[in-house]
Amino acid sequence: MQQVQTNEIGNETMAPDSTQPIELRIERTFDAPCETVFDAWIERDQASQWFGPEGFTIPLCEVDGTEGGSYRMCMRDPEGGEHVVTGSYVEICRPDRLVFTWAWEEDGVVGHSTEVIVEFAANGDKTDLVLIHRGFETEESMNGHNMGWTSSFESLAELLAA
């Protein structure tokens, strides 16, 4: 990889060379056990409360949290714009690892698919989470997802603290 940048909350962005996909890596510790954090990712009622950047709402959240199952979520931004993401669960190893595809849908057409890997590790009463989101077509797309995931993780932390 040509460059790695790390910011103050443990995010890394990796710029590709000609053979490497564009990849985002975020590390975060949550104040909850692995099982609780894992469930927040695959249970519809919980995902609908934290998913999406700050200020966004989730008017649609369909989750089949089984291996091979799919999900589809609509994130509504503060101006009323709707952003639909869809994908399928490739690997579910509760409570250690979750792998799923990620693609934006516009006017019923599913776009470029990327892969998200989430690893959960117990750290006493807390959970160390590593998210790797890879396969972006552009660094601009990766940077937008970095902002979205980082903001979403703030909401996840709030949900877990409640």
Image (cartoon, grey):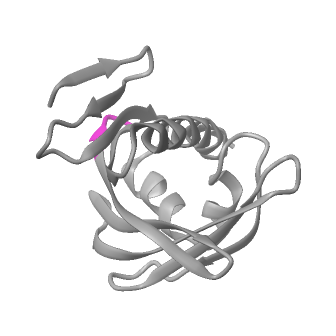
Give the residue at x 59% y 45%.
Answer: 156
Q: Main secondary structure of the magenta part?
A: strand
On the image, the x and y values in percent for residue 59 come to: 79, 68
Spot the residue most to the right.
Answer: 79
Is residue 155 left or right of 115 when viewed as pictured?
right
User: Picture coordinates of residue 8 (x, y %)?
Assistant: 43, 14
Q: Nearer the viewer, residue 108 or 5?
A: 108
At 56% from the left and 35% from the top, the residue drawn is 147
Q: How many marks?
A: 0
Q: Nearer the viewer, residue 155 or 25?
A: 25
Residue, far front:
18
Residue at the location (49% across, 61% down)? Answer: 41
Of residues 95 and 11, the one nearer the viewer is: 11
Q: Quadrant of the N terminus?
A: top left
| Image: 10 above or below 143 | above
Q: Which residues are magenta?
A: 121-125
Q: Is residue 142 located in the magenta-colored stretch of the structure?
A: no
Spot occupied by residue 83 in the image (x, y as percentages of width and height): 69, 61
Where 14 sits versus 52, above or below? above
Quadrant of the image occupied by residue 139: top left
Q: Nearer the viewer, residue 71 or 139?
A: 139
Q: What percent of the width, then of the height, locates residue 106?
A: 64, 71
Furthest residue to the top?
8
Residue at 69% of width from left, 43% of height from top?
A: 162
- Check the image and report above or below for 88 versus 48: below
